[in-house]
Amino acid sequence: MGDHSAAASKLPIPGKRNVLITSALPYVNNVPHLGNIIGCVLSADVFARYCRMRGYNTLYICGTDEYGTATETKALEEGCSPKEICDNGLWFPINVFQSWNKAFEDCHWQYHAIHKEVYKWFNISFDEFGRTSSPQQTEVCQSIFKKLWDNNWLVENTMQQLYCDTCKRFLADRLVEGNCPTPGCNYDSARGDQCEKCGKLLNPTELLDPKCKVCRNSPRIRDTDHLFLELPLLKDKLEEYVSRMSVAGGWSQNAIQATYAWLREGLKQRCITRDLKWGVPVPHDKYKDKVFYVWFDAPIGYVSITSCHTPEWEKWWKNPEDVELYQFMGKDNVPFHTVIFPSTLLGTGENWTMMKTISVTEYLNYEAGKFSKSKGVGVFGNDAKDTNIPVEVSDTLFTWSDLQAKLNSELLSNLGNFVNRVLSFIAKDLASGYGSVIPDAPGADSHPLTKALAEKVGIYVEQYIEAMEKVKLKQGLKIAMSISGEGNAYLQESQFWKLYKEDRPSCSVVMKTSMGLVYLLACLLEPFMPSFTLEVLKQLNLPLEAQISFSDEKGDVERAKRPWEFIPAHHRIGTPSPLFKELKDEEVEFYREKFAGSQADRLVKAEAEAKKITDKLSEAKISDGKTAKKDKTKKPAAAKPKVSGPADAEISISRLDIRVGLITKAQKHPDADSLYVEEIDVGEPQPRTVVSGLVKYIPLEEMQNRKVCVLCNLKPAAMRGIKSQAMVLAASNSDHTKVELVEPPQGAVVGERVTFPGIEGLPDDVLNPKKKVWETLQVDLHSDKDLVACYKDLPLTTSAGVCKVSSIAEGSIR
């Protein structure tokens, strides 16, 4: 993730185009939701990358939204402070495994860190990813409040609020659920602030048959004093802003419709305070025990996070002459950013940078229903990370079959096929290719087929830029992919394989032009697929800095009409390799089953499966892998203390340090045809280098970005000049003609120790080769008839379940 907070802060540059970008602040009480990532964060990242590519001075701001009801409520349940919840996270419900490993009792998720880690995997290029529970947030919020108070835009009112006699507290909006009062909706799980089904903003007292979410009892209505923003009095200022900026900023139709729907209904006073302890305190003696409402303080979070990036934050947020503000939101957040937040800023009377453009995403539907973080429905950011599916595939309706079709047809068959076809032909030896050297191509501009292609490509690039400038990102992506389709058609029509033998100069024109298209696609698709761009540039043997900027000053758009000139003749390319892997039917079914139902449903299922295993173990009365039978005729021997770790300890499986690892990079050994060299993350600051003899069994592309079981405490050994610091566990059949990796479940945490039910003990720091510990234990490592990896009868177990092999039953593991 491009969190540049440690680097020099960016400031607007007079005379340049300065673009400030924000995306919806993810709420800290859960793992990032795929709907939020795809809908807002990823869209904003695409636009930020595009702006940087065009040479605009760009600042992309986001962070975790940490104040509010959900955090305070969870803190009450857990008996800790809300800050501890945000800093350390919530206890994750994997206590079903506690009987196997006491260490699980201390397992916590650090939510702010998890959000950063998930966004890092998605390669989101934030310039600053902060949090709203900062001192800067308090300072900025209270400053805006004081301006509104001094300008008489705030009023005191007594309001009726739901009070729970059981919980002895006023209930904030999200602590109440009931039936939606909107005619025709009738949703029975509407929240006190908004109905998720129809999108209508609500007050808790409007709900029909309300219930306290904590105790499920019916609350009663009670009076309480609060402060309100006078939205009706700000209507004229707001309407002038909306009518002007919605046109200048090209607001999307759904944003315009939602905004004018609010204006037509008539603006109402909006409460800005609430009866909570966790939040920005109100700087007023009468209301000092209250905090600001989340809708008031959350949007201000963008300002406070910017102030963490630079003390001179006003140069971004109070500089409408030099800065353009783009915001990316889900459609349920539109009124907050087109009506309420602008009204708040207008009410201060200061010269704020007002939102120019809002890009609004529809709800992301999951299979048959809507993604819902609160209900745990759909795929969450950490889930997506564990699938190893490219991060670039997305749509408004998410179905696994549609994702499979897009990956296999658009990325693999269209884009991946074109790039690999061109590079592979160039890389062939001189008897059938160009020996990895790009040929010269004189006369390309007079070659009829090439000239026709160049004209089409030039038009596509102009359309791409027009679409991206208007934040029509999906349209921009489709246009870029059309260039790949044109490239495939160009190759087919040219019949380059025949030209190589019959008309070498024409073949050179076709291949040099095609290489230019590969390079052009890598640059155009960088905002959408940065990892694809990095890999293509690597295979082209070009530095990252070689990307086309498409800036107006450099004339790069015109250069696109002459693609044969992008890469010079005689340039030597790198090594071509496949860019995408086919997503197979069985994998689709696996993921559909894995993520079916809600998170709660999945937990129940996991607990049931785990109970079966523990019951089976209990019946077997397993102790260190053996069934103990007492011989009553013999005197019991003096008990020996059980020691695990030292070199002279009993040879127990606990002495092996087997961990869940993630292969972050795999390549052929430079001096050994049968060996791979992998970089594997095993939860340490630096990845370990591992050498494995798997070349003849597992294709290189299947070794990439894959979770494996790694034995980490073997003594390092040099293998053909490269020191191997661990060993990847694999299973083989009886005649050793087939080998498969032992794989942890997709949900297993990288770096966690693989354990064996019923066995405790610390591993050796390094296994003593003279004691033959590994050799003694290895003979009992095998895969059973159900493909579960076992030591004797004990499964290799992680927090997410047991480790398995793909198809080798009753094989040997080593």
Image (spheres, rainbow, N blue to C red):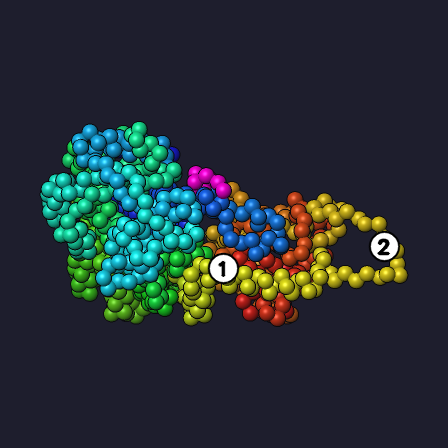
Image quadrant occupied by the C terminus: bottom right
In this orientation, which residue lies closer to the viewer: 443 or 796?
A: 796
The residue that disc 2 covers is 636
Res 441 visible: no
Res 750 visible: yes
The residue that disc 1 covers is 603
Q: Is residue 744 left or right of residue 793?
A: left
At 14% from the left and 46% from the top, the residue drawn is 242
Query: Which range is magenta?
Result: 79-87
Residue 305: image location, x then y, percent: 32, 37
Which image quadrant for residue 271? top left
Q: Amino acid at mark 2?
A: Pro
Secondary structure found at label 2: loop
Q: Residues within 10 Å of mark 1 (few under 14, many from 20)?
A: some
Which image quadrant for residue 741? bottom right
Secondary structure found at label 1: helix
Q: Amino acid at mark 1?
A: Leu
At 28% from the left and 66% from the top, the residue drawn is 488
Secondary structure that dominates the magenta span: helix
Whether pointer 2 and pointer 1 mark residues with C-beta atoms closer than 8 Å, the reply is: no
Query: In the figure, 677 relative to 83: above or below?
Result: below
Image quadrant occupied by the N terminus: top left
Is-magenta flag for residue 483? no
At 42% from the left and 51% from the top, the residue drawn is 214
Which image quadrant for residue 232? top left
Q: Which mark is residue 531?
A: none
Query: In the figure, 15 relative to 504: above or below?
Result: above
In this orientation, which residue lies closer to the viewer: 342 or 361?
A: 342
Residue 219: image location, x then y, percent: 37, 50
